[in-house]
Image: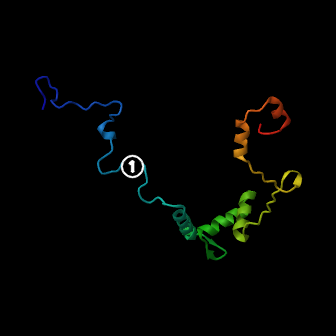
């Protein structure tokens, strides 16, 4: 209720740092942040894969009508594979071949320097600490190659 000067008795809400206007504040019961998906988002990669497979098996639609190629109704997966096959991009053509016939095995060869066997070396930390801790003269360190 206004007082004699026309001011409300209740103190007006001040807008400032950390005090957004009432219209911009989160509403009770609506959650913390409305931008976060609470439902509908796949919870794991397997769920995402299952959703993708469901979409791939659906009938492809163009202009409101099912896509018909060579007398049969196509699925979304078939349309995508046909686009990959007819593409001018080699990576898409390679992707089609890998889906159709499997990925070819890739030969991996491990060899050491100059084509020799791989040399596996261990490191004796105890000996290294003992060598560092023991006092030696400069002449001993030069004559014995050791830890650098």
- Asked if residue 88 can be seen in this view, the reply is no
- Name the image quarter holding the C terminus: top right
> Which residue has dot 1 on it?
34
Give the left or right position of residue 58, taking residue 22 as reference.
right
Front one among 45 and 26: 45
Badge 1 marks a residue whose secondary structure is loop
Question: Is 20 rendered above or below residue 83?
Answer: above
Residue at the far bottom in the pictured view = 71
Q: Residue at x 78, y 63 (%)?
A: 106
Q: Residue at x 25, y 32 (%)?
A: 13
- The x, y position of residue 36, in whole percent, is 43, 51
Quadrant position of residue 46: bottom right
Give the left or right position of residue 1, taking residue 130 as reference.
left
Q: Residue at x 83, y 30 (%)?
A: 139
Front one among 78 and 52: 52
Residue at the far top in the pictured view = 5
> What coloring was used for the rendering?
rainbow
Q: Residues within 10 Å of mark 1 (few under 14, many from 20)?
A: few
Front one among 90 and 139: 139
- Name the image quarter holding the N terminus: top left
Quadrant position of residue 87: bottom right
- The x, y position of residue 77, in whole percent, is 62, 68
Give the left or right position of residue 142, taking residue 77 as reference.
right
Q: Residue at x 33, y 51 (%)?
A: 30
- The x, y position of residue 66, in whole percent, is 56, 70
- Asked if residue 77 can be seen in this view, the reply is yes
Question: Is 142 rendered above or below residue 120?
Answer: above
- The x, y position of residue 16, in whole percent, is 33, 30
Residue at the far left in the pictured view = 4
């Amino acid at each position: 209720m206004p007082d004699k000067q026309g001011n409300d008795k209740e103190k007006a809400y001040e807008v400032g740092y950390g005090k957004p206007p009432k219209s911009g504040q989160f509403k009770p019961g609506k959650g913390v942040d409305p931008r976060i998906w609470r439902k509908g988002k796949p919870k794991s990669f397997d769920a995402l894969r299952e959703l993708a497979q469901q979409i791939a098996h659906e009938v492809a639609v163009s202009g409101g009508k099912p896509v018909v190629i060579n007398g049969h109704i196509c699925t979304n997966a078939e349309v995508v594979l046909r686009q990959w096959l007819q593409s001018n991009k080699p990576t898409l053509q390679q992707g089609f071949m890998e889906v159709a016939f499997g990925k070819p095995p890739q030969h991996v060869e491990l060899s050491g320097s100059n084509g020799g066997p791989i040399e596996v070396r261990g490191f004796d930390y105890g000996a290294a600490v003992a060598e560092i801790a023991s006092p030696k003269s400069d002449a001993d360190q030069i004559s014995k190659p050791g830890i650098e």
